[in-house]
């Protein structure tokens, strides 16, 4: 048995029918066309020449043997011609049907149930690819790495900005220290313990801080009010 037809004999397909179909298909397959599945008719009565359905990545092909198997008719429908596919399971096998955009309906009966399900699933996948566009997945694959690189770059830039800001913070706190520490820290006297001259000198110091933009007007006014109340 040829290896190329073994993969189509998983669901009790007639080996002779598969071999005959595959030998003919080699002459009609288009460039880059690959056979996805082959379903073979199985009628209750002995069927010497069963019909077959071949689904490829480009079309559905109905294979009908003629003249005692000496010849075969091929009727094909490309996926862009097909509107939808259907499966109807009966007591004896299933009917696989598909409708075209020209309102034609094609039905092949007595397909074994599991084969009908497999061919229906393959057909749905091909129609989904046609609907969504095969280029979509390629575009996503190309865009995804660039998006990852861009997000990494943004994250790196944000980290750098935070680091730079952190470096600036100590400088800002150094300017704030004279305001808070000069008044209370370093063992200095409380305002209530200062002399008139010391209070006046301290008020001048706050005025210099205000002029240099190191304290706000509101802060200066509060300090000034406190010192004047003690003078």
Image: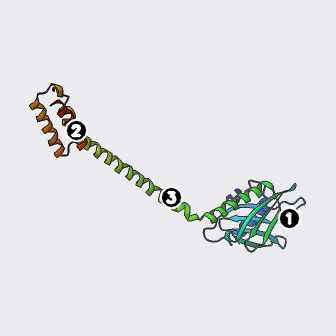
Q: CA distance from mark 1 to mark 3?
A: 49 Å
Query: What residue is at 38 percent from the left and 52 percent from the top?
Result: 154
Residue with the mark numbered 1: 48
Q: Is residue 66 above or below residue 48?
A: below
- Tell me whether the residue at label 1 lies in contact with that at label 3, contact meaning CB atoms closer than 8 angstroms: no
Report x, y in % for residue 151. 42, 52
Q: Is residue 127 visible?
A: yes
Q: Which residue is mark 2?
A: 176
- Judge by depth and name the residue closer to the eye, 37 or 120: 120
Mark nearer the viewer, 3 or 2:
2
Give residue 210's mark: none
Residue designated by label 3: 141
- Disc 2: CA contacts within 10 A as few (<14), some (14-19) or many (>=20): few
Residue at image point 17% right, 42% down: 209
Of marks 1 and 3, which one's residue comes earlier in the chain? 1
**Where residue 148 appears, x then y in whole percent?**
44, 53
> Alpha carbon of mark 3 to alpha carbon of mark 2: how far?
53 Å
- Is 207 or 68 nearer to us in this picture? 207
Is 222 left or right of 113, judged from the image as shown? left
Q: Secondary structure at mark 3?
A: helix
SS assignment at label 1: loop
User: Is 111 on the left-hand or right-hand side of 201?
Assistant: right
Quadrant location of the N terminus?
bottom right
Q: Residue drawn 14% across and 35% down? A: 202
Label 1 neighbour load within 10 Å: few <14, some 14-19, many 20+:
few
Question: x and y percent of residue 179 in the render?
Answer: 20, 36
**In x, y percent, where is residue 173?**
24, 38
Q: Secondary structure at mark 2?
A: helix
From this view, report whether residue 231 is shown above or below residue 207.
Answer: above
Front residue of 39/172: it is 172
Q: Is residue 113 above or below residue 202?
A: below
Q: Earlier in the sequence, mark 2 or mark 1?
A: 1
């Amino acid at each position: 048995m040829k290896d190329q037809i073994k993969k189509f004999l998983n669901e009790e397909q007639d080996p002779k029918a598969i071999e005959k179909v595959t030998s003919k298909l080699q002459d009609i397959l288009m460039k880059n066309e690959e056979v996805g599945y082959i379903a073979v008719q199985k009628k209750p009565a002995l069927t010497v020449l069963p019909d077959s359905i071949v689904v490829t990545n480009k079309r559905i092909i109905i294979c009908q043997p003629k003249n005692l198997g000496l010849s075969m008719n091929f009727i094909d429908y490309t996926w862009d011609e097909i509107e939808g596919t259907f499966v109807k399971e009966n007591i004896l096998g299933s009917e696989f049907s598909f409708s075209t955009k020209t309102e034609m309906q094609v039905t092949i009966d007595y397909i074994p149930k599991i084969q009908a399900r497999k061919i229906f699933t393959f057909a749905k996948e091909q129609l989904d690819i046609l609907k969504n566009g095969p280029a979509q997945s390629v575009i996503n694959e190309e865009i995804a790495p660039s998006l990852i690189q861009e997000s990494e770059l943004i994250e790196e830039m944000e980290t750098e900005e935070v680091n730079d800001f952190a470096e600036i913070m100590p400088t800002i706190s150094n300017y704030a220290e004279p305001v808070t520490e000069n008044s209370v820290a370093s063992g200095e006297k409380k305002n209530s313990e200062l002399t008139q001259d010391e209070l006046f000198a301290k008020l001048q110091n706050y005025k210099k801080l205000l002029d240099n933009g190191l304290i706000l007007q509101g802060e200066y006014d509060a300090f000034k009010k406190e010192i004047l109340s003690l003078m």
